Amino acid sequence: MTARQTWTVDRLHHVLPHSASRQQLLADVNLTPIEELPAVLERWAAVAESLDAAAGRIETARVSAKVTGELPLDLAADDRTGEVLRDAGTRDARGRAAE
């Protein structure tokens, strides 16, 4: 797809990869006041274009994960869940402070 193509709500709906995002698009379109609708649709078009631009990297990562069992190094996860929970002062299921 080109950088500034003509989008319709239907095309936006089909390009979104998850049902939750498709439902959010439809909710936004249905619940947004008409005068604010162009800005909302522009944001969704930007999301669709971003997904389209990332399609090649996504496919490369999928193939890499299938072949090697790992993501490319530039996409490796950096799990900081423990740090976030500790900083938030949350407690685990047993009531202990997160480490």
Image (cartoon, rainbow, N blue to C red):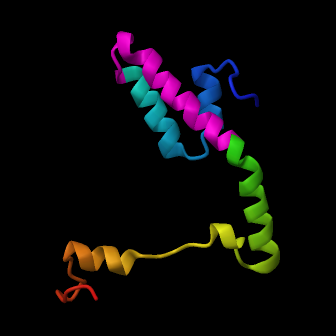
Q: Is residue 84 above or below residue 2?
A: below
Q: Is residue 63 above or below residue 46?
A: below
Please tell me which residue is depicted at 66% across the width and 68% down the height of the picture. 74
Please tell me which residue is depicted at 61% across the width and 35% down the height of the picture. 48
Residue 72: give x, y in percent of width and height.
72, 71
Q: Quadrant of residue 70?
A: bottom right
Q: Quadrant of residue 52?
A: top right
Residue placed furthest toward the top:
35
**In the figure, is residue 22 to the left or right of 76?**
left
Q: Quadrant of the N terminus?
A: top right
Residue 84: give x, y in percent of width and height.
32, 73
Please tell me which residue is depicted at 34% across the width and 79% down the height of the picture. 83
Q: Is residue 23 above or below residue 6?
A: below
Q: Nearer the viewer, residue 59 or 77?
A: 77
Q: Quadrant of the C terminus?
A: bottom left
Q: Nearer the viewer, residue 80 or 26?
A: 80
| Chain part drawn in magenta | 31-52
**In the figure, is residue 16 to the left or right of 81?**
right
Residue 6: give x, y in percent of width and height.
68, 18
Q: Quadrant of residue 62?
A: bottom right
**In the figure, is residue 90 to the left or right of 4?**
left
